[in-house]
Image (tube, grey):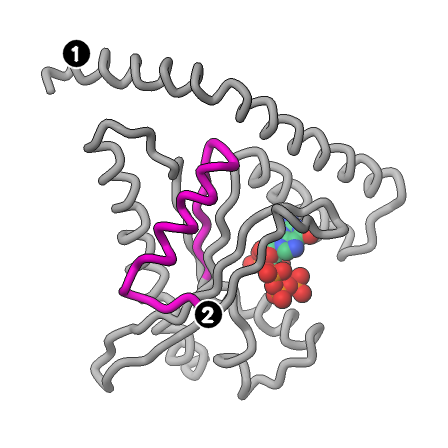
Amino acid sequence: MKHWDYFLAPYKQAVEELKIKLKGMRTQFEMGTSHSPIEFVTGRVKPIASILDKANHKGIALDRLEEEMQDIAGLRMMCQFVDDIHTVVRLLRKRNDFEVVEERDYISHEKKSGYRSYHMVIRYPVQTIHGEKKILVEIQIRTLAMNFWATIEHSLNYKYKGQFPEDIKKRLLSAAEAAFQLDEEMSQIRGEIQEAQAFFTRKKDAQDGN
Ligand code: 0O2
């Protein structure tokens, strides 16, 4: 157990630091006049049981986890609109507090399961008492609709251990299509939505005396 504590400590630190940094992006947008492309940010360190399962399933030796398991530290950034994802990706590429090592676009190329999301793998430097340690972190950027679908599918996957009954598989695929359509429809009326949101923010600011 002690060994895992030492191993996971820099991952925990990275998740905490990145949560603050990425949430900071949202705060900065809120202070300005433009719509925030970021709705909310979450982060987690993969539980030990999931690390072991994934290592086993993908044939990763435990002494190669640092190099080969890219999502021990994971952040998720949720956006309202698909276009916001691209804005966020461009902003992340420009940062100089980490290096982007890989990008996987499961939006243009959705997975067979119906999964859509944009994945960015970064190499993030954590400062420790023993010096700097660079670790891999996966940032998943998705719309609220993509997140809803992925969350539900993930729980069902856990329940059925990846072996979905045919009818559930079909329903999940049609739910993925519905989530895609929802994103499309929302993009079409994006201007209207943003005007309404800006109006409510101004009204609230006036009420708060800002
Ligand atoms: P967690 O922490 O439980 O979410 P692979 O695992 O082989 O599919 P790889 O190479 O690790 O893929 O990289 P990928 O696909 O970029 O990232 C894997 C992570 O993406 C998964 O983590 C999920 O979070 C998410 N993901 C990928 N495919 C799907 C999918 O079909 N459905 C859902 N709900 N999520 C998906 P884990 O390992 O599942 O861990």
Single out the mark in the foreground, 2 or 1: 2
Q: Quadrant of ligand 1?
A: bottom right
Q: Amino acid at mark 2?
A: Val
For the magenta stretch, what is the residue range? Answer: 74-101
Where residue 28 sits in the image (x, y, percent)?
A: 22, 40
Q: Amino acid at mark 1?
A: Gln
Name the mark on residue 94: none
Residue drawn at (35%, 70%), measured in percent from left and top?
124
Residue drawn at (82%, 54%), measured in percent from left and top?
163
Residue drawn at (57%, 84%), measured in percent from left and top?
62
Residue projecting furthest to the left: 209
Secondary structure type for disc 1: helix
Q: 10 Å neighbourhood of mark 2: few (<14), some, or many (≥20)?
A: few
Most foreground residue, 59 or 97: 97
The answer to whether 68 is drawn above or below residue 175 in the figure is below
Most foreground residue, 73 or 123: 123
**Is 203 left or right of 5, judged from the image as shown?**
left
Mark 2 or mark 1: which comes first in sequence? 2
Q: Which residue is mark 1?
A: 207
Where residue 125 sits in the image (x, y, percent)?
A: 31, 73
The residues tagged by marks 2 and 1 sit, at their Cα atoms, a distance apart of 45 Å
Does the magenta run of residues contain 119? no
The answer to whether 197 is drawn above or below residue 33 in the figure is above
**Is 41 left or right of 205, judged from the image as shown?**
right
Where residue 114 sits in the image (x, y, percent)?
A: 72, 45
Q: Which residue is mark 2?
A: 101
Most foreground residue, 142 or 91: 91
Quarter of the rendering containing residue 151:
top right
Residue drawn at (42%, 79%), measured in percent from left and top?
7
Secondary structure type for disc 2: strand
Q: 10 Å neighbourhood of mark 1: few (<14), some, or many (≥20)?
A: few
